[in-house]
Amino acid sequence: MVSRVIPVDEFDLVIFGGTGDLARRKILPGLYRRFRSGQMPEGARIIGAARADQDSAAYRKMIQDAIEEFVPEKSRDSESIAEFIKLLEYIPIDATGEGGWKELAAMVRKEVVKAFYFSVGPSLFGDLAERLHKYGIADDQSRLVVEKPFGRDLDSAKALNAVLAQHFDESQIYRIDHYLGKETVQNLMAVRFGNILFEPLWNSQYVDHIQITAAETVAVGSRGAYYDKSGAMRDMVQNHLMQLLCLIAMEPPNEFEPDAVRDEKLKVIRALDPVAQSDIVRGQYSGNADGPSYVEEAENPDSKTECFVAMKVNISNWRWKGTPIYLRTGKRLRARESEIAVVFKDPPHSIFGEQDGRRGNVLVIRLQPNEGMNLRVTIKEPGPGGMRLMEVPLDMSFAEALGPDAEDVPDAYERLIMDVIRGNQTLFMRGDEVEAAWAWTDPIIKGWTERGDKPKLYDPGSSGPEDALMLLHKDGRRWREIKV
Ligand code: NAP
């Protein structure tokens, strides 16, 4: 099977923060992979901008080094790297100053797609947006890409939206949540809405509950002090897990168009019940021989910030009333694993006896590692000995199903940046969605902040605090194991 690569239109992409960690680790390696796959048109141009005083030659060398560091050997070759870096230019600019802007204006072409990637802290968004207009660089066809964190609460998110709205229309703004760029996440929509099999069962009559897990093995490490100001609820739940929840729970949009999809996602967020504090477990990892504890890394012995959170969420609408969704995410856990598991109810009656015959199906959508899907079904155990039942997975791994082509499946950043150039906002968060997500999150955070709750300790390399297990046990359910 050969994957189709549809070239995009000619473009100028300006990356503010083009020398930063995100640009070097994700954005430029991603663009290189699209170049190597043949998706990038001739005449595409990428302009890095940051304060550091260097020329384009030094920037090209920096990005060549980054590609060699961050793109696996089998997905790169020196010839295409040499060709790719010819597309790069660099311009020294301070977002808050006036130097460099006239030069940038002279550089950016009028007649091609223009995209501006704000790969800098959100405090600079306003300065950049204003100067892009003041110097006549952006026009009403230009696109703007902004990174998380998009605010730290409803007020700050509203303020950011307002700052951008002064200079750009909502149809020009692409708020990145890289989870939405993952192949399996889009496949989730294909599976739900491209098949007749699942949708009739996709409701509280047939679905017992849903689990969404994003487990990481990494600690907060040297980012500890920075991370301590946000925590897992802000860093993961409000954006990534909420987006997954929306896609799994939304009504079928009438067409696969940006606003049709985003309208349905927004309705889900608005239908979320407030969460009782008794339905939330927060955690911090303790230290061991392999590494320091969370509070040590956060350099804050009294820290009350969570690096683990598990919670039970209810949706008050006709489809989902009575089917809880359990969310769980944390650092320094047993394995790196992100998945969505839709756990179906048991068959209503068993012809095989109560013990054996009543097992629900589970559909698992794996986001990482090894993106794919797996449907657990009950079959007869092979061989003589009567009708004994067993469960087997109908397994679909993208790497196996697509063979060598799996390597060419763009990663999340690659896909999303190409969507920006194509002008397709489907996989980007709209301003009202972000605000609705914060409006739901704010009271939850306020609840534990006001009470001064201290997160529970958990052993590094475990599945999180014991209380998180109890969250499901008390409902007669259990978490899926986080497998090594
Ligand atoms: P970083 O490594 O600190 O890089 C920041 C970049 O911005 C550098 O290129 C820096 O270069 C430039 N910069 C800083 N102040 C500037 C100014 N006044 N004018 C112009 N350029 C300026 O940060 P990062 O990790 O790349 O993150 C960038 C943004 O993406 C942040 O908002 C972050 O939260 C978000 N993000 C990052 C990741 C990630 O994996 N790194 C993931 C998701 C979201 P100079 O100092 O030379 O100006």
Image (spheres, rainbow, N blue to C red):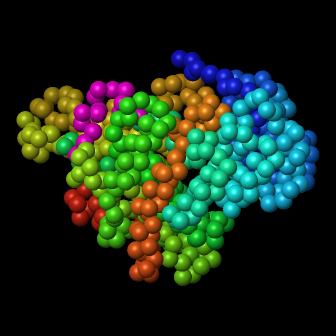
In this view, the residue in front, 43 or 166, is 166
Rendered residue at 33%/53% (across/down): 271
Q: Position of residue 71 (x, y in %)?
A: 70, 39
Q: Is residue 88 left or right of residue 202?
A: right
* Above or below, comparing residue 61 to residue 152 in the picture: above
Is residue 435 located in the magenta-colored stretch of the structure? no
In this view, the residue in front, 173 or 185, is 173
* Above or below, comparing residue 467 to residue 243 in the picture: below
Q: Where is residue 420 in the image (x, y as percent from the top left)?
A: 63, 36
Q: In this view, does 414 lie to the left or right of 273?
A: right
Q: Where on the picture, by quarter, is residue 418? A: top right
Q: Where is residue 449 in the image (x, y as percent from the top left)?
A: 45, 77
Q: Is residue 390 visible?
A: yes
Rendered residue at 34%/56% (across/down): 272
Which quadrant contains ligand 1? bottom right
Q: Where is residue 330 in the image (x, y as percent from the top left)?
A: 48, 60
Q: Is residue 319 left or right of residue 148?
A: left
In this view, the residue in front, 463 or 162, is 162
What span is in magenta? 189-204
Residue sticking out furthest to the top: 1
Rendered residue at 76%/48% (across/down): 132
Q: Can residue 78 be seen in this view?
A: no
Q: In this view, does 324 lie to the left or right of 124?
A: left
Rendered residue at 64%/68% (across/down): 226
Q: Where on the picture, by quarter, is residue 421? A: top right
Count of numbered labels shown in the rendering? 0
* Above or below, comparing residue 240 to residue 142 in the picture: below
